[in-house]
Image (cartoon, coloured by chain):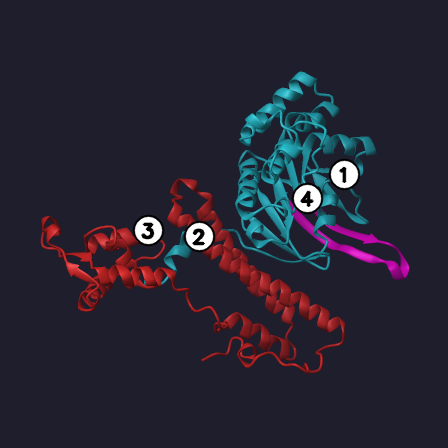
């Protein structure tokens, strides 16, 4: 998450000052991600240095606080950022994957038991998020989107664990590991979870 | 007190070399007002567990108690009466009768149980209204969306004074928005005092439950702890 671009997005609605930006940022993210006000001011200074925001004279009524508005360059930067997909092309370092891969090889360890420990933990996390979602009185659109994103992320991990569990069971039934494939996967794919 | 209790339930199909043990020594209790999810992959025994809990099938050994009554003490007719009066079923493919309207689908089981037609229809309309389907009462299944059909099926399952809801992959054929609606309705029925068991392979569905029980190869292998303070998850998030 880029605070820099989140602040540009808020300023694209009109001039705002620091404390206001922090409050609006937290409201927009369903108050799920608290933001340090010091970070807001530091980020505004950098945005000003880069010519993406400018001090705004129309917010002088807000007392001693300094207001800002977005520049044309800032608006162009925001538009480009919104349309640039995050880098999801290579597998991320994933501790869960590493633990299961290690458990497969380790003598005396039941990999299915290891999988279940993680599955239960993930389901318990999902229950907590779902409880928050259940209470519709606090349920604004932004909060719902954040909770959904977290539920789908956790769900995808559980689906992977379920698939791994089934694959390991079948492999055991077929008599253990197969011989290496004649056509190995691309190098990047073989490094799942161990990228520095 | 548990509304539904399974004690040491086992189920074996076939004999000799063809013997398959679908359930092994299952203990499970569900209180009135609570929702329990049974989670497992295909073939884990979760659908068998549900049919035994609802007396649609006999266990090979063990006992099922509903409201403290052992099902083995009931006659065939007694079990059928219990199913009609106390247990509501929801299936993945809705199981609505195509030639009946929504209100007729909901009222039919009540009429079969001896409730007068007018009274059964009033109860069916009330149940449909609770699920936001009052204006769909005269529609036939093929005139409704999948989400609406499943809501009718849930309205049917809880109509009358039924106290136990058993659901097998209730949102399996629905998109995630409709699946959420279905789970909210099942949870609302629990808040009104029903006991519910949902079997599913889907973690998003299971996460609506008060307790999730994990089934593997016919055995209960694990279960979640009660959710006590969900807000804590927000406090654990790092500052940006």
Q: Residue at x 54, y 33 (%)?
A: B192
CA distance separating discs 4 and 2: 34 Å
- Seen from the viewer's position, the closer of residues B75 and A76 is A76
Task: Assess whether residue B8 is covered by the magenta stretch.
Answer: yes
B55 vs A166: above or below: above
CA distance separating discs 3 and 2: 13 Å
**First in sequence: mark 3 vs mark 2:** 3
The image quarter containing residue B149 is top right
Q: Residue at x 13, y 57 (%)?
A: A66
The residue identified by callout 2 is: A147
Give the chain letter at badge 4. B
Closer to us: mark 4 or mark 3?
3
Mark 3 surroundings: few (<14), some (14-19) or many (≥20) residues within 10 A: some
The boundaries of the magenta stretch are B5-29
CA distance separating discs 1 and 2: 42 Å
Give the chain letter at badge 3. A
The residue identified by callout 3 is: A28
Q: What mark, if any, has residue B5 been given in the picture?
A: 4
| Badge 1 element | helix
């Amino acid at each position: 998450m880029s605070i820099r671009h989140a602040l540009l997005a808020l300023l694209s609605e009109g001039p705002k000052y620091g404390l206001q930006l922090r409050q609006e940022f937290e409201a927009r993210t369903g108050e799920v991600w608290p933001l340090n006000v010091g970070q807001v001011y530091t980020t505004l200074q950098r945005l000003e240095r880069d010519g993406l925001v400018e001090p705004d004279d129309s917010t002088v009524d807000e007392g001693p606080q300094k207001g800002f508005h977005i520049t044309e360059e800032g608006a162009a930067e925001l538009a480009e950022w919104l349309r640039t997909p995050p880098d999801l092309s290579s597998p991320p370092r994933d501790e869960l994957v590493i633990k299961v891969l290690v458990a497969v090889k380790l003598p005396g360890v039941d990999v299915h038991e290891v999988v279940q420990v993680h599955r239960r933990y993930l389901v318990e996390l999902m229950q907590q998020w779902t409880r928050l979602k259940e209470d519709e009185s606090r349920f604004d659109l932004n909060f719902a989107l954040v909770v959904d994103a977290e539920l789908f992320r956790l769900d995808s991990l559980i689906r992977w664990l379920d698939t791994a569990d089934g694959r390991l069971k079948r492999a055991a039934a077929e008599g253990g590991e197969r011989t290496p494939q004649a056509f190995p996967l691309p190098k990047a794919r073989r490094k799942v979870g161990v990228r520095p | 007190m548990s509304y539904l209790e399974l004690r040491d339930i086992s189920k074996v199909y076939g004999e000799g070399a063809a013997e398959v043990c679908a359930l092994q020594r299952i203990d499970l209790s569900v209180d009135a007002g609570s929702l329990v999810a049974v989670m497992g992959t295909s073939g884990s025994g979760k659908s068998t567990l549900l049919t035994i809990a609802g007396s649609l099938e006999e266990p090979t050994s063990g006992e099922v108690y509903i409201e403290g009554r052992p099902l083995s003490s009931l006659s065939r007719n007694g079990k059928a009466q219990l199913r009609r009066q106390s247990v509501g079923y929801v299936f993945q493919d809705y199981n609505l009768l195509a030639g009946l309207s929504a209100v007729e689908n909901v009222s039919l089981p009540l009429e079969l149980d001896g409730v007068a037609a007018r009274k059964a229809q009033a109860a069916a309309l009330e149940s449909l209204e609770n699920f936001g389907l009052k204006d769909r009462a005269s529609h036939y299944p093929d005139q409704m969306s999948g989400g609406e059909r499943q809501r009718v099926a849930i309205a049917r399952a809880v109509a009358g004074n039924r106290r136990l809801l058993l659901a097998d992959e209730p949102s399996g054929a629905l998109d995630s928005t409709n699946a959420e609606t279905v789970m909210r309705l099942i949870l609302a029925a629990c808040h009104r005092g029903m006991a519910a068991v949902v079997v599913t392979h889907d973690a998003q569905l299971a996460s609506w439950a008060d307790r999730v029980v994990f089934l593997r190869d016919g055995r209960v292998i694990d279960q979640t702890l009660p959710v006590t303070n969900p807000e804590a998850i927000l406090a654990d998030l790092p500052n940006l």
